[in-house]
Image (tube, rainbow, N blue to C red):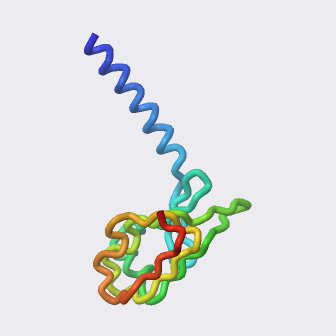
Amino acid sequence: MKRYCVTVLTVFLVVCLGKLSAQVEAKYKIHRIVYQIHDRCAYVVSPDTYKERLLLYYGSVYVPDSIHIGQNVHYVKDITQAFMACKHLKEVRLPSGLTYITNCAFSGCRALPEIILPDSIT
């Protein structure tokens, strides 16, 4: 019985993980910001390498309310650890509809004096 339960649970997890990974699309770089699309929402994410992150996220960065990919509009709702350790980042403007920022999203941004958070953050 125990072996049967483990097998069923394993199959269930594999199916769920496969569905989750199928829903996440590729990364898109638009105006120096890297996004990932999931359920019609755009998430600001880190580029694939630390060097690329430093090259993209420096000086002033403006994160728009939405991005257009093809015919679709995706609203920016989340910022992951995209800006982590961007030591040359001096200003970030966040979208008014942003709802979530992960822990440490701006840690190590030594040149960033302040961040004004929109009221929409939950």
The x and y percentages for residue 75 are: 61, 64
Q: Residue furthest top?
A: 1
Quadrant where the N terminus lies?
top left
Q: Residue at x 42, y 82 (%)?
A: 115
**Where 103 sits versus 118, above or below?**
above
Q: Is residue 14 shown left or right of residue 66?
A: left
Q: What is the count of numbered marks? A: 0
Q: Is residue 85 shown left or right of residue 119?
A: left
The x and y percentages for residue 92 are: 47, 82
Q: Residue at x 56, y 62 (%)?
A: 42
The x and y percentages for residue 100 are: 46, 63
Q: Is residue 75 shown left or right of residue 99?
A: right
Q: Residue at x 49, y 69 (%)?
A: 34
Q: Residue furthest left?
A: 2
Q: Out of 49 and 11, give the one closest to the viewer.
A: 11
**Where 55 sits versus 77, above or below?**
below
Quarter of the view holding residue 86: bottom left
Q: Residue at x 35, y 75 (%)?
A: 106
Q: Residue furthest right?
A: 71
The x and y percentages for residue 30 are: 57, 73
**Where 122 sits versus 111, above or below?**
above
